[in-house]
Structures are given as C-alpha cells and as structure tokens.
Amino acid sequence: MAGQTLEGTSTGKRPTIDDVARLSGVGRATVSRVLNDGPNVSDKMRSRVLEAVETLGYQVNLQARFLAGGANRTVLLIFSSDTESEPNSYYQAALETGALRVCAQTGFELVTHSVVQSGADVETRILHLVEESRCRGVILTPPFSDWSNLVRLLTEAGTALVRISPGSSEDPGAPGVGMDDEAAGFALARHLLDLGHRRVGFIQGLAEHLSAERRFLGAMRAFKEEGLDENAIVSRRGNFTFKSGTDLLPELIATDPRPTAIICANDDTAVGALFAAHRDGLDVPRDLSIASFDDTPVSALVWPPLTTVHQPIQEMSARAMQIIAGAGGSGGVAPQSCELLPFTIVERASVASPARR
Amino acid sequence: MAGQTLEGTSTGKRPTIDDVARLSGVGRATVSRVLNDGPNVSDKMRSRVLEAVETLGYQVNLQARFLAGGANRTVLLIFSSDTESEPNSYYQAALETGALRVCAQTGFELVTHSVVQSGADVETRILHLVEESRCRGVILTPPFSDWSNLVRLLTEAGTALVRISPGSSEDPGAPGVGMDDEAAGFALARHLLDLGHRRVGFIQGLAEHLSAERRFLGAMRAFKEEGLDENAIVSRRGNFTFKSGTDLLPELIATDPRPTAIICANDDTAVGALFAAHRDGLDVPRDLSIASFDDTPVSALVWPPLTTVHQPIQEMSARAMQIIAGAGGSGGVAPQSCELLPFTIVERASVASPARR
DNA sequence: GCTCTTATTGGAAGCGCTTCCAACCGTTCC
DNA sequence: GGAACGGTTGGAAGCGCTTCCAATAAGAGC
C-alpha cells in the first residue's frame, strides 16, 4: 500500500470511520473495536484511535451502526390519547422527564408516540410502530399497559417491554414499574379514619384503569377493617376529569348522612370537587375534607392545597428506562415482576378532622 | 436466470426489499421506486409490487433507507430544563402533543431532548445532539429559541430549524412560530382599562424570556396610550413560578394607592397570586382582579377561574412541525419570518370591574 | 532454538436501501 | 424505413458500520 493519504480526508462531509482509520494508521476494524469498548485492543492503538477521533471531531453514524448489526438505542414511549380530550399533561410530561433523564445518562434516545385509543386496529398500529422503529425497547403507559393481548404481541415480537403501573403485579407478561396502589388506597383511607371520619365518599376513575381500581379496593379494605357500615361509604364513577369532580360532588354530599370526607381517584377530579364545594358554599376542610392521589402540581396550587398521595411518576419511568437500558444486547429484561416504588401521603390543608356536629 | 426462487423467502427474519423484488418478479430498483412514489413506474409494475408488499407484510428498514441517502424523518424537539425545578409541564406537554399530531399524519418521528440549561457548553451539547441524530429538523423552545448564537450554529450546520416564540420576530436567523405577544399584552391591558381599572400591578417573568417581556411592553403601551400616570403601574420581576406570585403579590398590594388589578406573566404566577390573595383575606375579584397569560389548564381549575390570554401552544408546535415536514428534501424552510398565530382573551371570573371605593 | 498458544490486527463480506446509469422498448418524425 | 426520443426497467455501486476470519506478532514451554 502506498503512503497513507492523510490529505483529502474530508471535504465538507462528515468524517467516517475510514477517515479515522486512515489518520491513525490502523485498520477499520480496530477503530470499531475502540469505539465499542471491544476487547483485545492494545493501549497504544486505543490512544492513537482516540486521538484521531478527537482531531477529526468524529461521531459515529448511528443508522449505519444499527444497520450493520449493532444494537439500536431507541426506546419508544407510548401514550394513549383519547380523541379529543386534553391529555393528562402532567402525568405525561413527568413520565417523559423521568425517562429523558436516564436517556441523557445512558445515551439512549426516547421517541414518544401518542396513539389514539379508539378504533379497532389500535394494537396493530402500535405493533407496526414498534416494528418499524426497530427499537430497543418499549415503555407502555396506562391503559395500554393492561392490554394483555397487546403485551403478549409485543413480547412475542421480541421487544424489551416495560409497563408503567400495570393493574396487577402478578399478571404474567412483561415487567412493570408502579407503586403499590392497593396499599396507597389503604393508607389514605386509614389517614382519614385516624382523623375521625366515619362517612366517606369516593369518586372513582375509569374502570379500565386497573391501578386506580386497586386504590379504591385498598381504601375499602381499610374501611372494612375499621368495621364501618356498608353504607357509610358512597361511591360514584368518574373519568379522572375535573368535570367528574364538579358533577359528582353534589351527588355525594346529597346523601344522608352527608360524608365528611371525599376521596378522589386523582388530583384533577379532586380539584373539580373542590371547585364544586366552593361553588356550593362549603368550606373545605371545615365542612368537608377532600383527598386524592398523584400529587400533581395542581394539588399544591389550589386553595386550600390538597392532601394527596404522592406517586413517584418520574422515578417510575426512569426505572423503566433503566430496566430497558440494562437489558443489554439480549439479556432478558428482569424477570416478569413488577417493581413497586414507595409512595407517601402529602398532608396539606384540604383535610382536617370532621367538624363536631 | 433460472426460475425465480419464490421459496426460501424468509426464515424467521423480516422480509427485505429483495424478497419483495423476487416475489413480484421485478428489479430491486423498481420496488424502491414504488415505495417512494417515484416517477416512471408503470401501473402494472406498481400493483404487482404493492401486492407482494402486502402478502409479505414488508416494512422498510428506516435505518437502511437513511443510510443509503434517503431523507431522514426524525425531528428533534429540544426543551430547556433547569437543574432542579419542575419543568413547566403543561407547556412542554402541549408543545409535544401538537408536534406529535403532525408527526402521526406525516410519518415523522419526534425525538424529545431535555437539555440542562446551566453549564458553559450548552450550545456545544445541543449541536452534538443534533449532529449525531442526523435529524431532518429541530424545534427549539424558549429560551433556547432566543440564543442567537445557537441559532446561527445550527443553521450553519444545515439543519432545518424552527423556533418557538422567538423574542423578536424580525431577528434574522431561522423561521419561528409564536403569537403576537406585544399585541396580547396590549389587549389584556386594554381589557382591564375598559373595565375601569386605573391602578394595575404587573408581575413579570424572567428577563431572558423575550416573549414575556414583549407582553409586558404591550401592556405598558396600552396604559400609556390611556394616559395613565407613570406610577399608576407597579411591577415586580418574578420567574414564572407559583412562588413568584405568592411572594410578590403582598409587595404589590402594599403600595398606595393599592392596585385594583394584577397582571401576571403566566398562569402559574397568577395562581400563586390568587393563593396569596386568599391567604391575605382578599376577595377575588371583588377586592382585586387577577389576569394572566397562557390559558394552561390550571387557570380553569382554580377558584375563581382565571381570566387569561389563550396561547395556542399546540398549534404553534404543530405549525413548526409542518414547516419542517414541508421543507422537503432540501427546499429552504420558509423565509426567515415568524408566523404569528392568533390569541384570544378567555374571560373568566377572576376579573371584574373594580369595586367603587 | 523451535513449535504451540494466545492476544492483536486488518481485510472483506455484508446489513437493507437509494440512486446512477446503461439497456431496452414502443413511438414519433423526417 | 431508419434515426432520434422519452418513458421504463434492472444491474451495480455504494451509504458507514460491525463482525467473521485469516494473518501476524508476541510470549510460553520444551
């Protein structure tokens, strides 16, 4: 081979691995090994290559790397969007932020997809999305995380899958990350009981969101263990919206005897209930305590601020990303378990002991 | 050539373009043309290929397509994240949702990045992100959209760049999408004037967010045109947070004569101000009107709901995506102008005529 | 000193796709 | 009737990278 042509290296184009190889006077394969922390590279070679990379400002072409068989570093984050309703923006943004944080550390890329939940071919559409992207992993958010058929399809497609807040932690299938919703429901109910409440209303969420159902069941268990009368508890089914709260609160406080506290499936509903309470001239918490789940920012912004169960949303998605990132080339993702992150009850002013009647 | 080998097409692997070519008995180049809606393909060939694609369930490998020179369909959405503060989740989520909607229609992929704003090498880090991804375009959100050096660097790197809410619409550089902040500020101030307010307080945002400054200037223009006294207006500088509102409201209402209305740079600040008003025993809107900008969901959830200027966030990012998607292979993005989307004042209960003293 | 291992190294074969270009075909025009 | 022509078609050359594999260098053991 004639003298190594150091000239004519790059002409406006980005440097390639061959440019690096030429500059450092080594083979292309060696450069590749250095770039991938491969084994069997002498220190001398390594530093020579690294130096060339530095001077050339070389950056690998990820598409080429993947084409050639390297592992893709893309992870899909899939949200459900109802056709018209505003998405639950905080929940979505927080999940994303948590995942993004881990991405920045690990060099992964997060691609977000919002899939309209209606229509018959939803599962197929998602499957297509995943296959086309050739991604390394998928993070599925509720309620998709509970669609066991979808979970099965994706798993069969060989995707590293992590589910956010799966409804049942024993459900076989893919691993999941969530919090112990049943225990959270129990704890919040217990908190109200400890303050002296004996008549409680509950505004539930959508039945298909299993994790929300588990919160409800946990609360019911607390009431039952306390020996409360069956009809000491009144519940109505909402759909997680502000409107659920404004619409259903009147129904709950119309019952006799009137509840002294209301638990809502999520903060938005609670804020709606609070709004309705103001509207109807009730003083919170003197006349009525209101508590909820999630601890989204709005819960601290309203007056009075809401007592709510803090759900570690960012941590959940961060953990999900870690699981995928750690799954390595093919090492099976952690066993099909569901990691439960700790929750805490954030006590604010919307809850107090019931006024003596 | 011997009989076309229809057998042995795929063995567990995904079908490739060659499989399609073989099955349909045409050349690989023709398949490629069909897939890309290329010119000069007879209907007969086209339908034959399409049929083969169908039976094989073929999907292009995007990485390979890009490697071979096809246009990438990835767009980067870059957010700024302060080290620890909670991101403005609604703003972020709404921008993303808008962009995602267009992505779904156009087959683009949105990759979100959250870049920590502190540190000296921020611009370099962003540039790296962009170069490494080989993306088709970049959407820059505030305050990055006003970093003219960054804009210049990215433009020089040959990226299709669209800025969200750039501070100045005349600023040369890349195209932008926003709303007429100056006019919005003017309109909101005018609204208060029309109701009879003559003493107004203003809680500003961070000075580096130029679009917020323009709102302030617009409001000041309205006051000036009305002939209000210089010191009829009191302003304090906040940082867009709830805390800004709670902290600064007392200062504003401590002035003599006391303002009858407060304008806040954004909803969070207004919610804080409202919180402080409750705390300090003021009745909103009887004792004090509060208005703000953005119309994020929280503005409708608090009591009383806030009068605020609706900013079409989703539409802004949707438009940004369209500009990038429409920029085609290389056709220069629309001239370096800034598209201004219409805003509207959403009248709610937090604003009323000042009480007669 | 010489053969046998073992750690390094570079050549070359693709990964799946786009695109240039030469070949081809049915027309149109002189 | 033959030359020129524009619409079609398929072969082949990469895009930049990983990885298999043969080749070489360097120790190790007798």
Image (tube, coloured by chain):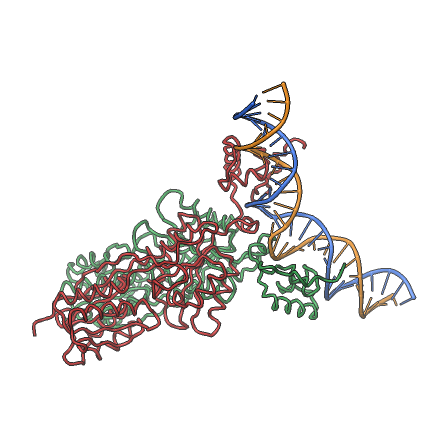
Chain colours: A red, B green, C orange, D blue
Front in this rendered view, residue A331 or B137: A331
Along the viewing direction, whichever of B289 and A330 lies nearer the viewer: A330
Instruction: Indicate the position of residue B99 as horizontal and vertical percent values.
Output: 44, 63
The C terminus of chain A appears in which quarter of the rendering?
bottom left
Specify the quadrant of the image occupied by residue B30: bottom right
Q: Residue A21 at x, y = what percent?
A: 58, 37
Tell how many labels.
Answer: 0
Write down the quadrant of residue D11 in the picture.
Answer: bottom right
Q: Nearer the viewer, residue A79 or B261?
A: A79
* Residue B118 x, y percent position in the rendering: 35, 46
The answer to which quarter of the image holds residue B191 is bottom left
In-image side of B215 versus A149 (left or right): left
Identity of the residue drawn at 61% across and 53% down: B68
Q: Name the side, left or right, on which B18 lies relative to B344.
A: right
**Residue B227 appearing in the image:** no
On the picture, is A170 further left or further right than B305? right
Q: Residue at x 16, y 73 (%)?
A: A228
Residue A121 in view, yes or no: yes
The location of residue B273, given as percent across then percent down, is: 22, 62
Name the one closer to the observer, B288 or B191: B288
Residue A93 appears left or right of B111 = left
